[in-house]
């Protein structure tokens, strides 16, 4: 709702919040643990954005989720915070996988994962194309909890890196699903999904837009998902 967002803008400025306005939620209100709330504060995240407010409690509840919101709305933290909490509960190697369409985005997600996880001991590795496999294989041998990858390079490792498997994966995120499919990663994603466990795996799909391709990816990858959609007018 437009007026509420206007207030958010003004909160850091000089105009006071109307007294009849509901108090803004905090990350703690959404069920985020203290060390992660503190990391949010350190990053300057004072209140959850609308997509974070809607998506985080559902993801913490273990629901498969489709999150639709425009670019810049804070989708990254909406999926990283629940993933970090799930890792903390069961800190196992190759617990979580985040697939992103481009190298640059994969590095941005890694940075935000490390920043949000700075007060907890979570290891994260990046697997992207256009560079040597060997340093990535060394990173994998250290058994990171979370992998951020572009689909082509991930498949390359799944097929060619000895001892690397995602058969115990618990948490999958498909970020920018619309762009993943625009870039024709569909066949690669199909191959990846075939080797991932389905039982006991949570999946979150985030996208700026919904399309028939995204819907078919949703059907292939998610189970009984709940959809959270934040319209552009909320920003
Ligand atoms: P999206 O993936 O939806 O395009 P991002 O996750 O990249 O959006 O977030 C956009 C920007 O907003 C980033 O610079 C991020 O650090 C910032 N951001 C995210 N969540 C919050 C928040 N709760 N409060 C303030 N800034 C935030
Ligand atoms: Mg994003």
Image (cartoon, grey):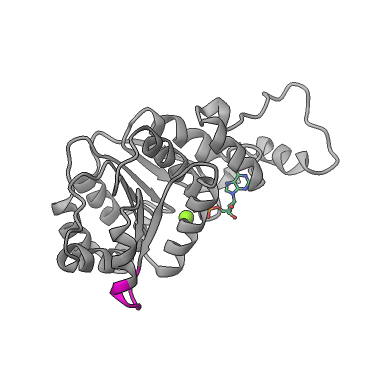
Give me the residue at 22% from left, 51% from top: 216
**Residue 8 visible in the displayed image:** yes
Q: Which region of the structure is painted magenta?
A: 128-134
Judge whether 127 appears above or below 74 on screen. below
The residue at the point 43 percent across, 46 percent down is 122
Is residue 98 found inside the magenta-colored segment of the image? no
Residue 152: x %, y % from top left: 26, 68
* Left-right relation of 201 to 67: left
x 58%, y 38%: residue = 48
Whether residue 205 is situated above or below residue 26 in the rendered picture: below
- Give left or right: position of 152 versus 228: left
Q: Quadrant of the N terminus?
A: top right
Farthest residue toward the top?
A: 20
Looking at the image, the residue that sits furthest to the right is 14
Numbered-mark total = 0
Rendered view: 56 above or below 101: above
Question: Percent from the top left, x then y, of residue 51?
Answer: 50, 40
Provide residue 109's location: percent of width, then percent of height.
Answer: 46, 57
Q: Main secondary structure of the magenta part?
A: loop
Horizontally, residue 10 falls left or right of residue 70, namely right
Residue closest to the eye, 48 or 123: 123
Choose top left, top right, bottom left or bottom right for residue 66. Answer: top left
Q: Position of residue 41 (x, y in %)?
A: 65, 41
């Amino acid at each position: 709702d437009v007026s509420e967002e206007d207030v958010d803008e003004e909160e850091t400025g000089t105009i006071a919040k109307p007294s009849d306005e509901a108090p803004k939620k905090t990350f703690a209100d959404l069920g985020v643990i203290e060390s992660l709330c503190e990391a949010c504060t350190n990053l300057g995240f004072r209140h959850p954005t609308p997509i974070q407010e809607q998506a985080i409690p559902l993801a913490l509840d273990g629901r498969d989720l489709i999150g639709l919101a425009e670019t810049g709305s804070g989708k990254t933290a909406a999926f990283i915070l629940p993933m970090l909490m799930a890792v903390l509960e069961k800190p196992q190697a190759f617990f979580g996988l985040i697939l992103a369409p481009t190298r640059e985005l994969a590095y941005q997600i890694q940075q935000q994962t490390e920043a949000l996880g700075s007060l907890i001991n979570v290891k994260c590795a990046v697997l992207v194309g256009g560079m040597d496999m060997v340093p990535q294989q060394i990173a994998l041998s250290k058994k990171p909890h979370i992998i951020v990858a572009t689909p082509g390079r991930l498949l390359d490792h799944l097929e060619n890196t000895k001892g690397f498997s995602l058969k115990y994966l618990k948490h999958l995120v498909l970020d920018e699903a619309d762009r993943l499919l625009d870039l024709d990663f569909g066949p690669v994603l199909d191959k990846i999904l075939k080797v991932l466990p389905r039982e006991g795996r949570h999946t979150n799909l985030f996208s700026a837009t919904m399309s028939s391709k995204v819907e078919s990816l949703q059907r292939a990858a998610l189970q009984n998902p709940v959809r959270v959609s934040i319209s552009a007018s909320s920003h």
